[in-house]
Amino acid sequence: MKVLAIHNYYQQPGGEEQIFNTEATLLQSHGHEVLRYTLSNDQIGQTHPLVLAKRTLWNRAVYQELRSLARQEKPDIAHFHNTFPLISPAAYYALKQEGVPVVQTLHNYRLLCPNALFFRNGRVCEDCLDKSLPLPGIIHGCYRGSRSASAMVAATVSFHSWLDTWNKAVDRFIVYSQFAMSKFIQGGLPAEKLAFKTNFLHPAPPPGRGKGGYALFVGRLSVEKGLGVMLDAWRQLGGRIPLKILGDGPMAGLVTQAMQDMPEIEWLGRKSLEEVYEVLGDAAFLVFPSEWYETFGRVAIEAFAKGTPVVASNIGAIAELVDHERTGLLFRPGDPTDLATQITWLLAHPQTLDQMRQEARTEFEAKYTATENYKQLIKIYQAAINQNN
């Protein structure tokens, strides 16, 4: 099978880039030919805002380029990871015009929410979920704090909803959780085109030992990731266990201040994946305090692969990943006292913590390996291909 993999890279590489490349490598390891078509958002700074808005709505150059590429290479399937903002949904139509089935992975909620997170002013927000025109997102400047930029996003989504693009030009949408699937159906995407597939790791790291005696946070230092909730919980814990923080982001200053107030907190900054695995494997447990509707939570399965239990918010997709008191613990989202209570209980039950380590690795091997994921992915591809025959 020849796969055309398509992705619009962000200016700062993140999880989507990792998934895009890992999936392409997985397909190649099974003998499939993978053609990669990518654009980088580095071009945005050199583009006039009106030109950018037009391209976001419909990028004519990309449309022509992909039609030509499809005629030349004749791929069996086109798999999109992100079209925003430079590739644009016009790319779907280009491939469909050439008879190529189209699959789109939904990494976030961009089709339903201008900022793609369902999160505003420090809380979950669904104001645009059932709107044909996401006017609240424009009024509040939900995309990059700009009403004009938010209007551009809203116009793109509304225009293609009006064109019925999601129904006519996409054969299958891949979603990573049942929770996310329910939101997309609620937002109007055709339920029969939504396909559930877990995320995965390839290659899978070996399990760690968990002997470091510390808790760990890995992720973007931002409000929606629950960083403030976690730091408040650590104040309540009173030094019961050290906390290491991996990542960077707009709340870095808050972490710096927290280190001055609480010497048991250590900020390690950004690290390579190999370094993350090493620190993760030695952690007693991972703290996953997100306050938004995570569509999956890849770092959770990275923890499971290392045999590290996860203490997570009971919200969104992450609540599906963590089996309370088996592979970790769940706490009330946005509640630092409940987080501190759960951690205190876990520290008081070391035998349960040891058992959780075994269960976490077992969970990974049962659900999140490359072997299992490849089967799921090919099944989705085949369904898209059969629909076009």
Image (tube, rainbow, N blue to C red):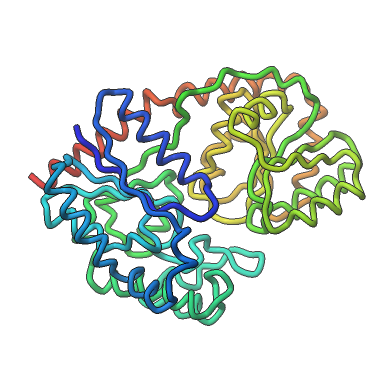
Q: Nearer the viewer, residue 333 or 2?
A: 2
Q: Height in image: 374 above or below 66?
A: above
Tell me where residue 86 sits by quadrant: bottom left
Q: Is residue 260 left or right of 130 when viewed as pictured?
A: right
Q: Position of residue 386 (x, y in %)?
A: 13, 41
Q: Is residue 219 left or right of 284 when viewed as pictured?
A: left
Q: Nearer the viewer, residue 275 or 139?
A: 275
Q: Say which residue appears at 65% left-offset and 22% top-offset.
A: 357
Q: Say which residue appears at 67% left-offset and 44% top-offset.
A: 247
Q: Height in image: 325 above or below 80?
A: above
Q: Position of residue 161 (x, y in %)?
A: 29, 70
The quadrant of the picture occupied by the N terminus is: top left
Q: Nearer the viewer, residue 75 or 369?
A: 75
Asked whether residue 326 is in view, the answer is no
Q: Is residue 26 left or right of 209 when viewed as pictured?
A: left
The quadrant of the picture occupied by the C terminus is: top left
Q: Nearer the viewer, residue 134 or 191?
A: 134
